[in-house]
Amino acid sequence: YWIMMNSSKPSTPEIKEIPIAENEICVILPMRNEITNVERKLLSIIEEILPHPSVELIVADSNSDDGTKDIAKEILEESTLENDRWKIMEFDVKGKNVALNGVLETINSEIIVISDADAFVSPGWLKIICSRIKERDIGVVSGIESVVSTDNQSFDDYYRGKSNRLRILESSIDSTPVLEGSILAWKSSALGSFRLNDRMNADDAQIGFAAIRRGYRAIVDWRITFRGFEEAQRRTLKESVRRAQGLSIVLIKNSYLAISNPRKSSRMAIFNALFLYVIFPWVAFLFTMNSMFAFSIGPGIGNNWE
């Protein structure tokens, strides 16, 4: 699969000049205890959407106890964004998916965008999203994380670079099952009355698979990039494990799409993700545990492996 993918070249669709005013767009920013990011996140988003009156902004505060909601309200009130174009919604129950579902129950926008509070999205993302999502067969559009190429590149950077390339290639063919919740958009007509499973993480994967199940493409566009506000900050082990668990569960629940799928061209991408993120880690773990157990019985087993 990797040889086949690396032998192909990604296509770069032209960005069409689609009047953003023709679309009702809702940008949702889920936040919980984001006191260090709330100001710079809001300022970057406001700068992008300000010229477009059809775009509204909703801050979904998930039971913050550090003053995130108050700071967000103060920033929005002092901004030049009209009062009828923004709101802050509070939720007593913790959880990103709970907050997102609560907002989705109240809006009826044609295009919905979500973005994490700790991600700075490169300017121009709104124009690209509107252009790509107007393509008839595309239901979900995501971006990719910027990778800084240095001589002292870490494993995370190496992995991210290879992962980005694979997802870009998969998207040019049809769909990719691994998206990014740091910046993600979909059209309501593609997902219908879809709601997130608030008992699982990986909201991005849930949304992507919902589109694929309904016969739409879920893609990343390499021209939409994001990075953390703190350049040196990396995802913690706990965050990585939580994200991996959520992605694994979503892949398992949608594993049948690797065989029976209305979008035939995406079957191999789903099978590859299922193998890479679910099957391979467990096989590697079981092999390692089996080896440790075998050698603990007697070192001589190395000469009689069978």
Image (tube, helix red, strand yellow):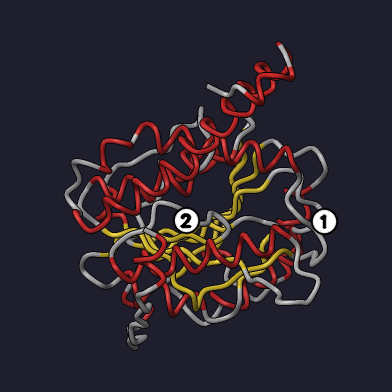
Alpha carbon separation for disc pair 2 and 1: 25 Å
Q: Is residue 52 left or right of residue 301?
A: left
Residue at the far top: name it: 297
Q: Which residue is under mark 2?
A: 179
Residue 152: image x %, image y %?
Answer: 81, 71
Q: Quadrant of residue 252?
A: top left
Q: Amino acid at mark 2?
A: Leu
**For residue 42, side relative to residue 49 (left or right):** right
- Return the x and y of residue 44 as percentages of the image width and height: 66, 72
Indicate the quadrant where residue 293 lies: top right
The residue nearer to you, when weighing 158 against 137, is 158
Task: Judge whether 289 appears above or below 29 on screen.
Answer: above
Q: Amino acid at mark 1?
A: Thr
- For the point 46% across and 69% down, the residue is 55
Residue at figure coordinates x 29%, y 49% from the top left: 191
Mark 1 crowdedness (10 Å alpha carbons): few <14, some 14-19, many ≥20: few
Q: Residue at x 58, y 65 (%)?
A: 83
Is disc 1 placed on a helix, strand or loop?
Answer: loop
Query: Could you tell me which quadrant the N terminus lies in?
Result: bottom left
Label 2 neighbour load within 10 Å: few <14, some 14-19, many 20+:
many
The numbered mark, 2 or 1, whose residue comes first in the sequence reads 1
Up the image or down, 120 lies above or below 63; here it is: below
- Looking at the image, residue 168 lies above or below residue 259: below
Q: Is residue 290 left or right of residue 204?
A: right
Q: Which residue is mark 1?
A: 36
x and y percent of residue 108 in the render?
34, 53
